[in-house]
Image (cartoon, rainbow, N blue to C red):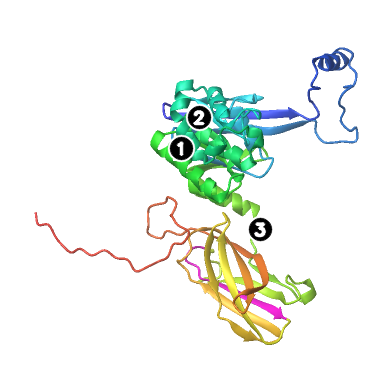
Amino acid sequence: MSDVALQVEKLSKMYRLGTIGTGSLRQDLQRWWTTAIRKKEDPFFQLDPTDVRRQTLWALRDVSFEVKKGEIWGIIGSNGAGKSTLLKIISRIVRPTEGTVRGRGRISSLLEVGTGFQAELTGRENVFLSGYILGMSKAEIRAKYDEIAAFSGIEKFLDTPVKRYSSGMYVRLAFAVAAHLEPDILILDEVLAVGDAEFQKKCLGKMREVSQSAGRTILFVSHSMQAVTNLCEKCLWLQHGQVKALGEVTTVVNQYLANAQQFKLKQNWDQPADAPGNDRIRFKYIELVPQHAQPDSPLDIRTPLTIKFEFWNFADEILISTSLVLFSYSGECIFDVPSTATMCQKGIVSGECTIPGNFLNDGSYYISLYVVKDTSTSLYDYEECLSFDLEDYRGEIKWYGKWWGAVRPLLPFRLTQTEWVLQ
């Protein structure tokens, strides 16, 4: 179809474990003669005979998907899932074992910090070198040069050899080149993790801008689920080299996070020595109690959630407060609610807080509790002590797209007819 920018069909990549080049033509010929003609063992590299693992590894297996022009796709998965191998095949760096990749237009790839840079050349010279590699003419690069330099934020270092750059300076310049030389398909593999928070925000904004205004297609690999959710429209989840899920970004990210997390609704400890904490505070019990209308009702957005907990306090006459902080599993803080500060004696301290129904959006969440003395000094931080998943509920609403926002409150909101037009 004319609106398809990238089509991947039944893509597979197999590696043979232990098969490497020697780095020398003479030794490669000697290896070929020894192994292929004389049928003897490789004289330069041998696997441990006690190693019973398979001699082949499928980095990718039957991967198929289709990206339309102007779409931004996130590619997620754990380390070793095959994300980088997929991007290298699309970028024509690695040949697939099976399957095909069809793309329309010029592809620009930024797969690691300083891709295509020559260490002895200056930043200015590397801008032109990278542009040539991407297929741009000298006139095209010169027309974009000032914009590239300004975006990188390292203008005063552009006449310095890049071997003297920090990793952050590398990625600033490399991304600036890739984003401004107008590729039809831009491929980014976790490169923004090197930059600072301000530059990451700037890059995400630039990617969104070039996709919406210029209609460019972007493939974005990141371990930051918040960045993927904020930037991308569609998402591909790879697991052990195979497609686990693909589709709307929020749905796929939630599935990925739910798979990675074991939800905890209750924890308790009989003895302080076994409980999480320190010599000042140790938790005895913590539980998420859904206030279901029916015992077998699902945990959905309508369900009020009560958090109950107890902890051992080992000090007398101490002013204690506790903050309940709710996070989405993409790392976004939804809210931070502090308790009242209470003067406590040595013994067990209890707490309770209720999140009303029809307040949170559907998705995966976790709760952290922070116990504080005198409203300023930390006593103990209990990270991710509870986790849960909320299902969606629409009732009479017939729109089934993703509901926007971190929260979804049921607020008084009505329409009133104030004028009538008589026919």
Kindly identify which numbered label has been placed on residue 262.
3
Across and down, in percent, residue 13 comes to: 67, 29
Which residue is at 45% across, 35% downward?
147
Across and down, in percent, residue 27 comes to: 84, 17
How far is disc 2 from disc 3 in space, using C-alphas? 35 Å
Label 2: which residue? 6
Q: Is residue 398 magenta?
A: no
Residue type at mark 1: give it: Glu
How far is disc 2 from disc 1 in space, using C-alphas? 10 Å
Q: Residues within 10 Å of mark 3 (few under 14, many from 20)?
A: few
Residue type at mark 2: give it: Leu
Q: Residues within 10 Å of mark 2 (few under 14, many from 20)?
A: some
For the magenta stretch, what is the residue range?
300-313
Which residue is at 53% across, 74% downward?
354
Q: Is residue 248 visible?
A: no
Q: Considering depth in this image, is 41 or 150 the residue closer to the camera? A: 150
Give the secondary structure at mark 1: loop
Image: 19 above or below 285: above
How far is disc 1 from disc 3 in space, using C-alphas? 32 Å
Q: Considering depth in this image, is 25 or 34 the residue closer to the camera? A: 25
Residue 53 shown left or right of residue 382 in the figure? right
Quadrant the C terminus occupies: bottom left
